[in-house]
Amino acid sequence: MKKYFSYILTLIVWAVGYYVYLPPLNLKSTELWSFLVFMAVTGLFINAYRLLVQIDPRNFRQSVSNGTRGVKIIVKAAVVFVAVYLVGQAISLPVFRAKDYSSLINVTNGNFEEDVEEADFTQIPILDSNSAAIIAERKMGTMSDMVSQFEVSSYFSQINYNGRPYRVTPLRYGSVIKWFANRSGGIPAYILIDMSTQNAELIKLNEGIKISPSEYLSRDLMRCLRFRYPTAMFRGTYFEIDDSGTPYWICPVMDHTIGLFGGTDIKGAVVLNAVTGEHQYYDIEDVPQWIDKVYDAELLMEQYDYYGTLSGGYINSVFAQKNCLKTTDGYNYIALNDDVWVYTGVTSVSGDESNVGFVLMNQRTKETNYYQIAGAEEFSAMSSAEGQVQHLGYSATFPLLLNVGGEPTYFMSLKDAAGLVKKYAMVNIQKYQIVAVGDTVNECVKAYENLMENSGVSISEAGERLNASGTISVLKDIVTDGNTYYYIMLEGDDNIYSLKAADHVDIIRKNVGDSIEIEYVEKAGGSCTVTDIIK
């Protein structure tokens, strides 16, 4: 037994290392190659004494040769590992495979007004992840039965849920001791935050979450995945809920499609029920539609950057840089057609302060649309918005792209030092000198519309056209910013309808008691804006 002790110890160390490190058994994984190096180093270290105890000073050379046969095998294996790794890296470099890298993503030219629905200001996501985390922490603080045992996790995912934008995150155990005390019941709830209303709701589960990153041993999420999918290379894990509110972990499976380590792409996803542990792998084209995120924003932007810089070849991307484009440094999310799309601007590689256009990239399907609309770069727009409230010291969130009456528009929340949303700002992308700020979304929209009109830009009202008719019970005119607005109420109708007198001069012919038929759209806060006086 003594003779084989070091070998047994080596195997134990390797087994423990694998259990902790969990590398995929896939030659395309750099994690596996790192683990192979770990195996070689630990094997040499543990077995080094075998060489030392067998060295005979009287016959040094022969004793070293006899005692290092096993060590030589490990050294040779390590050399082979390093050689294969370096060759794999070399054949994966963009300098040799520029065309392949530029083809990772298919980009089509889109029509902004047709592809991006006009903004519904009752469903604008006004929270970023930091603000959502603050609201979640405050909500958690009110749950006296849970706050001592659980915390809010960092797994915030933006999803579409029942047609509205939400951020969702599970709870996590407060410590290892609290895990021991509560593991039998699992994590009892998750937090759902409405990004439009800023309302947070703690959703309690009939049966607790048993699989999560805050678990240990076999219930740890990555360990649970690894022992079921030993060769899969996972790229992140995301917490989502299906249409019935059941919590799931979405685990994209990536592949390297260029050489051994290059051309990272997603080939499918494992969908794991966070409560029961049931799991299923889907190829990328079969991923269920309720899932909102398979491709992360960083990967999509990386692939677009390859497309934008390498389409003309690697040498062109370094020297002439003709027609070379890249994404800007930040991004945001847009909800379109029950999917979540990544938005980011596109600028020249020279790094000027303007955009030549922007792209929308679907996080479920990787569909990518480019819109050639030149205008302000996002951080310039953020600075413009902050300049309007510089006396208050508010900071702007990364812009959200909106279609406001056919005009591409940046929308931003303005936050105080505590990270709470205090005001809102809108900047026209093409006419970026137009900057509107308001205390509410409705005020901001109104100010923006006035500025646009004063600048000679006519914008249509966003939203579904509805009709109303009846007898006028209230008719009031109010002057705001030099413009006259009329407010109308109808008998038996609680809505208040507003219109600008200059746009609908026929209103001066109407009096209380007259009949009227109007076309209108609903606006943020439940107000109704008249788009036409029919009769």
Image (cartoon, rainbow, N blue to C red):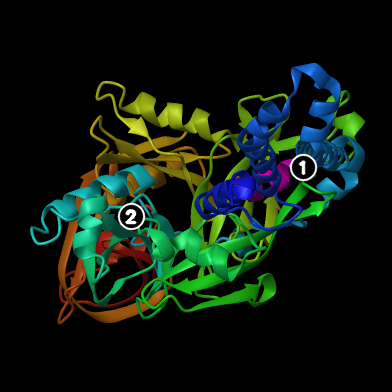
Please say if 114 is above or below 36.
below
Which residue is at the front of the view, 353 or 47?
47
Give percent across and percent down for residue 327: 65, 39
Give the image location of residue 528, x and y in percent.
29, 65
Q: In the figure, is residue 384 to the left or right of 374?
A: left
Q: Nearer the viewer, residue 18 or 394?
A: 18
Q: Secondary structure at mark 1?
A: helix
The reply to whether callout 1 and callout 2 are in contact (CB within 8 Å) is no
Q: Residue at x 48, y 37 (%)?
A: 455
Answer left or right for 58 relative to 342.
right
Circle number at residue 390:
none
User: In the shown orientation, is residue 115 left or right of residue 312?
Assistant: left
Residue at 63% of width from left, 31% of height from top? 49
Callout 1: few (<14), some (14-19), or many (20+) C-alpha neighbours within 10 Å?
many
Give me the disc on residue 306.
Answer: 1
First to last magenta residue range: 298-305
The amino acid on which the numbered mark 1 sits, given as a three-letter code, is Tyr
Q: Which residue is mark 2?
A: 500
Answer whether residue 515 is visible to the viewer in this image. yes
Q: Quadrant of residue 163?
A: bottom left
